[in-house]
Structure formats: structure tokens, C-alpha cells
């Protein structure tokens, strides 16, 4: 895994800030760069004329008056132009710091013109980059942890088999297979994340009988679960079918079931049900865990967001890479469907509903 680069901070920032604050900004209230340039030209001409008039009035002579008037007008132009362009200099300096990994720098300006709008957009971009960098670092840490756990378990299992500590019986091989599947699932997440970033993927559509398909997905989830759970499959009507990409749909439901298992109490019930209503088919995954607060029901489908809900024992449950539900939403969207958290029956646990068109998507 690639290492993350810590943001670099600069101790000279305070000196730079004090020097910056000494710039005069009398033109900030003006809402147009064209108007500001006009004011600068007018100020330059007025200063030139005043100094020239004063020099000639008090008898300093042309050879001394004109150079002084010229220098005075240049100084006024420099002072006004420096204040007007300060946000641009700040953005240049901030961009250099961003190139070194520091996304905390913001441009300070009260300018009301196009430069002020550009500075506001720059600050918004810097905030987004700062947030994305924090998410990237958290994702690398999460993925590193998720990779290390099954790799360590698989290595220990293989060493025990090689040293003869345990016999290569079905139970030992099944445990090794479970860790291998966990690794494969994580690699699949990362590959799907790259497809998600690209914004497109192919669908291989086929007609799927839902009840046997859901039963097969449940069997896979039961095989990889370390908890003692009761699994239920429901389909109304029993012969309900859907036209979809089987691999993508399996991926969606596997992610939802993995999330349900993680938050379910021991000896809890996980139910997956399907029903058809008109041109839509609804697939629900319901667990008996601590539920999902309403304020988090949209956020959990964002990339790198990790669930954190209370269990029946009052302890928070966390885990995963923060990619499963984001990938599930992406795959459902490819089918022209929607995924959302809805109120569960009796307000017990969490219920995630997938809504898909019964007919295949047109594109």
C-alpha cells in the first residue's frame, strides 16, 4: 500500500499574514474589475495633475515637478493595484502549499468583484480537497487494516497446516477459504471503486428467478458469517422474476447482508424479501440490530463512510472499508433503480430497500 503524505505546515505563515494585511484595499466594495481599473486610471491622472499644479504653483519648475508627479502617480497605482491583486497572490501561494500536501490554507478577501468570486470558489475547492484528502487517508488506513486481518489469519492457518499443528480437515480448510474470500471481496471493492470513479460499467442482463437467487445469496452469507443467526427468505409471488445483471445484483445484496450481519446481535434474524408492485420490484434486507439514525440514512451511502450504530448491548459497531454501501448504490443506479433506508416494522433494527425496474434499463 502507498503511504500517505502528511500536510506540511509553514512557520513563516504568520509573517506572511502580517505583511499581507498591510495592503491597502480601498477598492474592495467595488463590484467590477473594469470599474476598479477605471478608478485606478482616474486616481493616477488626478494625482499627476495635482502634483503638477502644486509644483508649478509654488515655482518648483518643470524639470522637478514632472518627475515627482510621475513617481507619485506610479506609487498610487502600485498601492491600489497591489490591494486589488492580493487575492490572486494568496491563491498562488495557497496552490503552492497544496502541491506540498497542505490543504488548510484559505484565501482571505472582502473583494466584491470577479476576483472575490474566484477566491470564494478557490476556498470551496480547497475545503473539498481537504475533506477528500482526509477521506483518502482514512480509506488507506481502513483498507490496510482490512487487508492485514485476513492476511494474518490466513498466514497463521497455513503455517499451522504446514507445521502439522492442525490437520487439513474440512473445518481448517473452510476457515482458510473464508479468509481468502474476504480478501477477494476487498479486492473486488477496490476494483469497483475504480469503475465508480470512471462513472460507467457494462451490464450483462438476464432473467433471474428471484426466490432461488435470494436463497443462494443467503447461503453464501451464512457460509461467511461468524455469528449464529437465523436467515429468512421471502418472495411475493413465489415465481417473481427480474431482468438484471446477476453478478451486480448479487454484489449489491452481498454488501447489504454483510452490513446486516455486522450490526445484528447474536441469535438475531436477518430477512431478505422481494415483492413486485406494478413495474417495480422491491428487495428488502432487514436486520434486528441497533438501527440507523434518520440523520445518517443518506450519509451511509457516501464513499468512505463507516456505519456506527448502537447494538442491543449499547456498544457501537463499526467496521468495513466504507465502500460497500457506496458500491451498492452505484450498482443499483446502473440498473435504473434506487436504494434507501426506510423505517423497519416496529422500528426494530434496520431495513434497506432496493427498488428496481422489472424491465431492463434502456441504456
Image (spheres, rainbow, N blue to C red):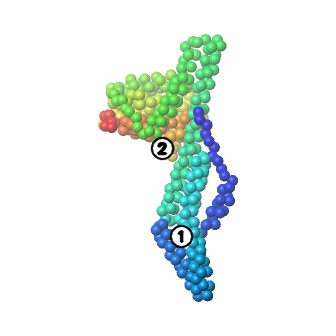
User: Split into 4 quadrants, where in the image is the C terminus?
Assistant: top left
Q: Depth check: give the residue in front, 166 or 124.
A: 124
Q: Position of residue 232 (x, y in %)?
A: 45, 26
| Direction from residue 331 to residue 361 in the image, left or right | left
Mark 1 Cα shell of 10 Å, populated few (<14), some (14-19), many (≥20): many
Q: Residue at x 61, y 37 (%)?
A: 3
Location of residue 16 (image quadrant): bottom right
Quadrant (top left, top right, bottom left, bottom right) of the N terminus? top right
Determine which residue is flagged by label 2: 298
Q: Nearer the viewer, residue 76 or 338?
A: 76
> Which circle's residue, 1 or 2, is located before the other in the chain?
1
Instruction: Please give the name of the residue rendered at 40% of the width and 37% of the height, measured from the top-left corner.
Output: 200
Percent x, y for residue 56? 58, 86
**Residue at the spot 58% in from the left edge and 69% down from the top edge:** 79
Residue 218 pos. (x, y %): 45, 25
Residue at 41 percent across and 31 percent down: it is 248
* Structural crowding at the residue carrying mark 2, measured as other residues with C-alpha within 10 Å and reported as few (<14), some (14–19) or many (≥20): few
- Left or right? Give the position of 208 relative to 184: left
State whether residue 310 appears in this view. no
Residue designated by label 1: 27
Alpha-carbon span between mark 1 and mark 2: 44 Å
**Which sits in the foreground, 2 or 68?**
68
Labels in figure, total: 2
Q: Measured along the vertical axis of the image, is residue 156 above or below residue 56?
A: above
Residue 247's quadrant in the figure?
A: top left
Amino acid at each position: 500500500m502507498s503511504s500517505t503524505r502528511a500536510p506540511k505546515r509553514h512557520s513563516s505563515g504568520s509573517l506572511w499574514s502580517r505583511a499581507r494585511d498591510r495592503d491597502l484595499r480601498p477598492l474592495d466594495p467595488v463590484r467590477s474589475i473594469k470599474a476598479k481599473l477605471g478608478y485606478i486610471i482616474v486616481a493616477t491622472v488626478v494625482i499627476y495633475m495635482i502634483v503638477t499644479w502644486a509644483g508649478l504653483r509654488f515655482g518648483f519648475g518643470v524639470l522637478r515637478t514632472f518627475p515627482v508627479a510621475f513617481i507619485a502617480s506610479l506609487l498610487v497605482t502600485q498601492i491600489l493595484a497591489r490591494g486589488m491583486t492580493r487575492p490572486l497572490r494568496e491563491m498562488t501561494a495557497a496552490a503552492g502549499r497544496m502541491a506540498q500536501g497542505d490543504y488548510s490554507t484559505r484565501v482571505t478577501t472582502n473583494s466584491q468583484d470577479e476576483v472575490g468570486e474566484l477566491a470564494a470558489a478557490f476556498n470551496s475547492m480547497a475545503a473539498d480537497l481537504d475533506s477528500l484528502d482526509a477521506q483518502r487517508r482514512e480509506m488507506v488506513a481502513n483498507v490496510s487494516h482490512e487487508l492485514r486481518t485476513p492476511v494474518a489469519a490466513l498466514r497463521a492457518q497455513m503455517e499451522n497446516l504446514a507445521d502439522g499443528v492442525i490437520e487439513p480437515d474440512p473445518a481448517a480448510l473452510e476457515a482458510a477459504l473464508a479468509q481468502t474470500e474476504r480478501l477477494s471481496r476487498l479486492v473486488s471493492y477496490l476494483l469497483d471503486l475504480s469503475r465508480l470513479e470512471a462513472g460507467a460499467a457494462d451490464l450483462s442482463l438476464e432473467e433471474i428467478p428471484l426466490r432461488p437467487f435470494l436463497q443462494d445469496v443467503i447461503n453464501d452469507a451464512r457460509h461467511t458469517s461468524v455469528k449464529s443467526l437465523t436467515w429468512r427468505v421471502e418472495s411475493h409471488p413465489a415465481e417473481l422474476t427480474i431482468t438484471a445483471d446477476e453478478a451486480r445484483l448479487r454484489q449489491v445484496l452481498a454488501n447489504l447482508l454483510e452490513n446486516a450481519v455486522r450490526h445484528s446481535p447474536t441469535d438475531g434474524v436477518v430477512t431478505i424479501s422481494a415483492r413486485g408492485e406494478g413495474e417495480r420490484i422491491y428487495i428488502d434486507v432487514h436486520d434486528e440490530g441497533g438501527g440507523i439514525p434518520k440523520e445518517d440514512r443518506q450519509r451511509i451511502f457516501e464513499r468512505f463512510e463507516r456505519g456506527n450504530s448502537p447494538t442491543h448491548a449499547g456498544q457501537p459497531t463499526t467496521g468495513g472499508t466504507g465502500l460497500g454501501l457506496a458500491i451498492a448504490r452505484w450498482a443499483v443506479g446502473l440498473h435504473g433503480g434506487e436504494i434507501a433506508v426506510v423505517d423497519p416494522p416496529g422500528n426494530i433494527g434496520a431495513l434497506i430497500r432496493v427498488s428496481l425496474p422489472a424491465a431492463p434499463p434502456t441504456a
